[in-house]
Image (cartoon, helix red, strand yellow):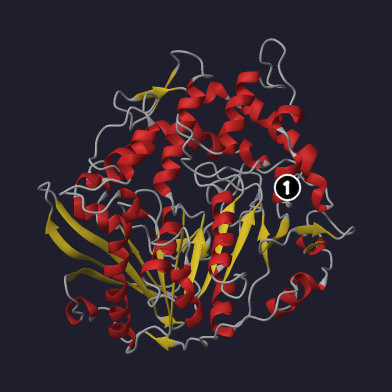
Amino acid sequence: MKHRSRPLLLLVPAALLLASCSTSPPATPPVLGASRAATLQTCEGLLAGFRHEQTQIDAVTAVAEGALKQGAQAMPAHCLVKGSMHKRKGSDGRDYAIGFEMRLPQAWNGRFYYQGNGGLDGNVQPALGALGGGPLTGALFQGFAVISSDAGHTGAQTTVFGLEPQARLDYGYQAVAKLTPMAKELIRTAYGRGPDRSYIGGCSNGGRHAMVAAARLGEQYDGYLIGAPGYRLPHAALAQLWGAQQFSTLATPGATAPHPLAPQGRIPDLSSAFTPQERQTVAQAILAQCDALDGARDGLVQDVQACQARFNLQTDVPTCSAERTGQCLSTAQKQVLGTLFSGARSSSGQPLYAPFPYDSGLVGANWGTWKFVNSLALDPLAVGTVFSVPPGRVEVLKEDLGARLALLNATDDNYKESGLSLMTPPGHEQPVNLAPLRARGARILLYHGVSDAVFSAEDTRRWIETLGKALGGSTEDFARYFPVPGMNHCSGGPATDQFDLLGPLVQWVEQGVPPQAVKAVARGAGNAGGVNAELPADWSATRSRPLCAYPAVARYQGQGSLEDAGSFICQ
């Protein structure tokens, strides 16, 4: 593809980006200063030479440069340390421990990165410092020392760990609290000094880990990279159950689909309630009303908030007069979808979770998987075994969700913290407890796919607004939120979903330069980080857009290629 010359927006330092895209005053919290590079002093010696309370090192291996890859990117030479903390016999008679691996680069940039993993954890993912959105590089490649863990239980225990009280607590927040000081001491032993700067990040449950750490471990980390945060995960899971109940009224009676986690190996087939063709019809109606609000008809809704006011499901999507054809929605479908996007409620009208924004990314396969499959197989497992007191089986399509919400708030003699308490950041309703973090000079970056089907981008937007009010008006000197139009849960969908927010976060923490526009690229054919098969056929394989710090919107400047981020400006 022939590249055009770009306007100054994406070619200048972020300080000038801020000047061009924001009228707010300069950041007032202190700048923490840059980290210092160092060289690994010992690798094999860590097996016998490292000591920390309740910690066992199981294996230490020197990994040569290029022996490990992240996508097509060769990882630098590093030391791989595998071990565990707090080995114990659980109250259920099973063996538990907090398993971890840590990768210590030979050429270290002086920084530590805690990699929060997704889902129900249970596996030690490779400690590459993977970033959300299909990035080309992660924290390890950038020179960070990186840790990854299973959060206190193994994959074999994934379906039952929630029955063991301490395993619940480790998953919720205690594993991060226990691993953090150990990891810093391991770094000190390996390099002769501890990290100058510490960062934590992840997407989905990993984003929740990072947000919880901001509230519980504010003195331990300098930067928080929070992607699609399931910070109200129990509420979101309830909303999933509610959605399954609603869709079941529209689905083909008796139809089932296979699923390995289902009790009988099959689940009701909800996909007929809102078919891919019907989702495409709704997406096209959203684009017809909202695509041009940013100045360009390009298959992306950049002005998300304006779209919510503009799009009307009842009038903008044709109503079927007889049989469903895929080109219209029945009155019953519109009723279900309207309530789905406006936010789940119990039968008594009690809110269960946040609304979801209308966005064209609902055509994504991941959107359908969460709504039609995971709502029947994964979410009931989490609600019943991890979040409820007492734990018990969830009858998804028959549950009184108002009564189930009470179980998420409950405690007893065995489970002394409720599911909501152990999963959510303390004080998230009015997060004034983050004021010391701001005063110290730490920074928070959040991102969220606007078409995330399980954790609502609207919930994240509301949180950043609430944070601003709690801290006196604005968060832009401390925390910034980057919505990603079209993106599903953490990646995918018709979106430019490949971006690096860790680099801008480091620059903000250590140099005081706040990010306002971050380049994001579509993962078309030939992409080294993996191809996104859901990109529209008329998009360039390398389409790029600026992700803009809310409330700024990427707007077309009136000239230049629609495939080039340089043709858009955040304003």
Q: Nearer the viewer, residue 480 or 377?
A: 480
Q: Is residue 380 left or right of residue 51?
A: right
- Identify the residue under disc 1: 301
Residue 405 in percent (x, y) is at 36, 40
Q: Is residue 227 left or right of residue 186?
A: right
Q: Is residue 161 left or right of residue 554?
A: left
Determine if residue 185 is in view: yes
Q: Is residue 148 left or right of residue 330?
A: left
Determine if residue 222 is in view: no
In percent of the image, x 71 and y 55: which residue is there? 542
Q: Nearer the viewer, residue 559 or 70?
A: 559
Q: Is residue 120 above or below residue 393?
A: below
- Quarter holding the N terminus is bottom right
Say which quarter of the image contains residue 513.
bottom right
Dot 1 falls on a residue whose secondary structure is loop
Q: Residue furthest front?
A: 348
**What crowding class fits label 1: few (fewer than 14 Cα within 10 Å), some (14-19), or many (20 or more)?**
many
